[in-house]
Image (cartoon, grey):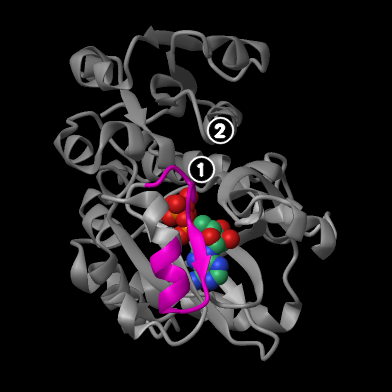
Amino acid sequence: MVTHSSKWTIATLGSHSALQILKGAQDEGFKTLAICKKGTEKVYKQFGVADKIITVNDYMDLLKIQDKLIKDNVIIIPHASFIAYMGPSNVEKLKIPYFGTKKILEHESDRNKEKKWLEGAGCVMPLIFDKPEDIDRPVIVKFHGAGGGKGYFLARDTADFKVKIKRHSGKKYTIQEYILGVHMYAHYFHSPLTGETEILGFDKRYESNVDSIGRISARDQMALPEEKVDPSYVIVGNIPVVVRESYLPRFLEMGEDVVTVSKKIAGRGLYGPFCLECVITPEGEIYVFEISARIVAGTNPYIHGSPYSWLRYDEPMSTGRRIAREINNALKDDKLKEVLE
Ligand code: ATP
């Protein structure tokens, strides 16, 4: 076993949070590799985060080149686009050293399993309506496999749902209670080496067109065709947030409990970065509507660290760097198997 970071290469697909992952790996003394789709290499070259770039026609080509990467001591760091492009079943089949618990993927992608997991950890979740006829409050209708909130719509009752769903015939969907409050995405890191769950930051999302509708008056909204003013939730960026300090104990407890339950349902459980996607109501209730069991793009504003990571580490510590630090610590203690699958 090679125990020095410079003998290992940290790799990821060139998208999502790759800049941060690769920069963090370089800062921790690793070599870095970006696996890029033709035409996207320029960015990874320009920012100098990739010591090597491999260009592929399709991200699935990773399956074809993985034997060579294994020989070259490459470790893969997954991000959301990585899982979306490869698909959970291909990710499970990967032989290349991988940072994260693959078994957790099914508990994240299956809404019933996700609900059991999060509610089992004491998280309050929005109600799910099995049938449109049951809708008795405002709901958000989410399509399965939707690319980041595309086409999601709000409905105030069953009749409204029936009119709006006509534009989406044939698609699979979930009807979820719409929680009125502010969105808060909490970023965590669980260390399998120390057993500690850390808060690394918070963000809110910048979504089109829901974040722009408020810029036009109600009178002008009324004048527009319905499909133009119906909110959609297409993510286009992330904005850093600091949460009111009195919420921190609850956020920390939620992160810890989610990890504890994950250990009962998925092998050695959730570790590394994860995110609880929340809405906080005016009454101070924190609803969790989703979990991301890996690095989220909302950590990207914190390449030089967040206020929380600064308090804790007193040195620039992005989530990407925290991943590399964990692998580094594992290498030093000869515990690499504890952080890789
Ligand atoms: P991702 O997988 O990237 O998190 P997604 O496609 O699964 O995205 P969601 O995160 O579930 O989509 O939802 C998209 C957006 O819709 C959220 O950022 C939030 O603005 C809004 N949203 C989702 N669920 C609710 C809810 N129950 N109440 C209020 N707003 C919600």
Residue at 66 percent across and 87 percent down: it is 284
Residue at 70 percent across and 86 percent down: it is 282
* Residue 289 in sight in this render: no
Disc 2 + disc 1, Cβ < 8 Å = yes
Identify the mark nearer the N-term, 2 or 1: 2
Magenta part of the chain: 146-163
| In the image, residue 270 above or below residue 225 | below
- Mark number, residue 28: 2
Q: Is residue 6 magenta?
A: no
Say which element carries label 1.
Answer: helix
Q: CA distance from mark 2 to mark 1?
A: 6 Å
Q: Amino acid at mark 2?
A: Glu
Q: 46 or 25: nearer the eye?
A: 46
Mark 2 within 8 Å of ligand 1, using the beta carbon: no
- Read off the residue under disc 1: 325
Mark 2 Cα within 10 Å, few/some/many (few <14, many 20+)? Answer: some
Q: Is residue 161 magenta?
A: yes
